Amino acid sequence: MIAVMLEELAWAIKKGAIIIMIDISQVAAANYHYRRYSLDYFLDSVTRLGFRNIELWASGPHLHLDYFTNQDLKNLNKKIKDRGLKVICFTPEQFVYPISISHPDKEYRKKSIEFFCRHIEAASLLDCEQVLVTTGIAYLDVDAADQWNWCRESLSEICKTAEKEGIYLPMEAFTSFTTHVFNRASHIAKMIEEVGSSHLKGLADTDVMATTGKDTLHDFIKELGDNLTHVHFVDGNPGGHLVPGEGILDMAGSLNVLKEIDYKGYLGLELLDRRYILDPEKAMRDTMKWFEKHL
């Protein structure tokens, strides 16, 4: 039924009967590739470029929570607001750091749960409504069903804090190089159903899905519906997490797919390729130009 509705909507849009727009304000700059510059520089940079919303990567050297008090976070929030910016997604580093809610060791999972809960509380201090979560690396020599169950139990605990703080948790599927337990849109949908919390949501990453090669953006829309609340909108070869237009992915096509469903969430710019490290503002400027051309 959903597929039929999408086809009918796409036909109406093509014929000009319906015009749906994604606004430039839905594009959220991010600090991943600004790590050779200070966080203040990042905030000033994206303000200069005209961004209004940001996805804030919580990692050293910018924002490692072990070195931030609650007052530090409140001061940071003031800096962000003074520039007319808003944090729309708080993304803790969970790949380089030893974080995994599907780890066999109970104490490891406990520390990972505490890690996410601390970041949820920090997001609240930053007036941010979303915290990105993932399962972490899955062992190939450990039973997949066990790892799935550990993940579900951990998320159930994390969601209690999210519900208390009024924070939503867009969950991202990783590539097969990281996990074989959680790398499809259907996995996200199933986990949302099993956890049973209205605060657990889904995220689609255009480059991750291309690298994994199992799903398309249409699949994520079909599986998640209104639970798709965040998109990492990046190009790739696949792989790389590049500025739109610098890889081989059909980014214009992906944007049109989101227009067809009248997507109201944000498009996070998770640029990771090291080519952007020394001149991160140029990458953001090139991205803004791409959107100005295609919106």
Image (cartoon, rainbow, N blue to C red):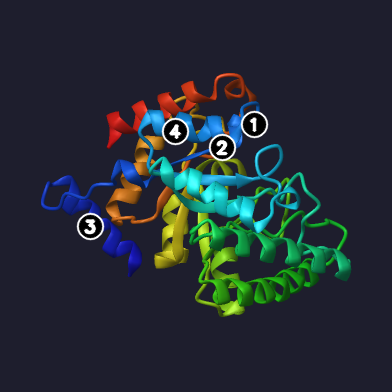
Q: Is residue 206 above or below residue 106?
A: above
Q: Residue at x 51, y 71 (%)?
A: 166
Place residue 115 in its image quadrant: bottom right
At mark 4, the secondary structure is helix
Circles 2 and 1: CB distance less than 8 Å? yes
Which is more N-terminal, label 3 or label 2? 3
Of tags 3 and 1, which is closer to the observer? Answer: 1
**Amino acid at circle 4:** Val
Q: Which mark is residue 281?
A: none
> Which residue is identified by label 1?
35
Residue 225 position within the rendered picture, expressed as x and y whole percent measured from the top left: 41, 65
Residue 14 position within the rendered picture, expressed as x and y whole percent measured from the top left: 18, 46
> Which residue is identified by label 2?
31
> Which residue is identified by label 3?
9
The crowding category of the residue bearing disc 3, from other C-alpha atoms within 10 Å (few below 14, some 14 to 19, many at least 20), is some
Of tags 4 and 3, which is closer to the observer? Answer: 4
Circles 1 and 4: CB distance less than 8 Å? no
Residue 38 position within the rendered picture, expressed as x and y whole percent measured from the top left: 61, 31
